[in-house]
Amino acid sequence: MTEHHRWEPYIPARTRLRVIEASCCEAFILAYEEGDFFVWRHAAAGRFEQTARGPYRLAFLAWMALITTHPKHNREVTPEHLATAPQA
């Protein structure tokens, strides 16, 4: 499921982490911090990891790929939702 995403340790910045959207069970969170968007998840021992840190488009597309393949995904991703993805 997440093998194609490179997960790295999340190191908090001095600014507040902002949640943009979360998967149904909050396994994956689309977040914003210090000018970067990224996907955030819980890791072992109370730690957190991040992937796709950078512009909104990069993070949003990674987040969509993760939530649509997540086994606990319980909401339908509609064409209207996908249309909110920024264009290149």
Image (cartoon, grey):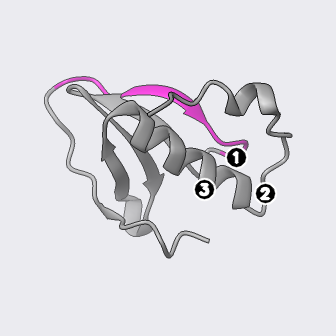
- From the viewer's perspective, is residue 69 above or below residue 30? below
- The kind of secondary structure element at disc 3 is helix
Circles 1, 2 touching at the beta carbon (< 8 Å): yes
The amino acid beneath tag 3 is Leu
User: Residue 5: x percent and y percent?
Assistant: 44, 66
Q: Is residue 20 magenta?
A: yes
- Which comes before the other along the chain, label 1 or label 2? 1
Residue beneath the point at 77% across and 25% down: 80
Q: Is residue 13 magenta?
A: no
Density class for disc 1 (Cα within 10 Å; few <14, some 14-19, many ≥20) is few
The amino acid beneath tag 1 is Cys
- Which comes before the other along the chain, label 3 or label 2? 3
Which residue is denoted by mark 3 in the rendering? Answer: 66
User: Residue 12: x percent and y percent?
Assistant: 21, 41
- The kind of secondary structure element at disc 1 is loop
**26 sits left or right of 37 in the view:** right
What label sits on residue 39 in the rendered view? none
**14 sits left or right of 86 in the view:** left
- Which comes before the other along the chain, label 1 or label 3? 1
Image quarter where the N terminus lies is: bottom right
Residue beneath the point at 27% across and 29% down: 33
- From the viewer's perspective, is residue 54 above or below residue 42? above
- The kind of secondary structure element at disc 2 is loop
User: Residue 4: x percent and y percent?
Assistant: 48, 72
Q: Nearer the viewer, residue 48 or 59?
A: 59
Which residue is denoted by mark 2 in the rendering? Answer: 72
**Residues in magenta, as a range:** 15-25
Density class for disc 2 (Cα within 10 Å; few <14, some 14-19, many ≥20) is few
Residue beneath the point at 40% across and 32% down: 56
Which residue is denoted by mark 1 in the rendering? Answer: 25
Q: How much space separates mark 3 and mark 2, taking CA atoms? A: 11 Å
Residue beneath the point at 23% across and 25% down: 35
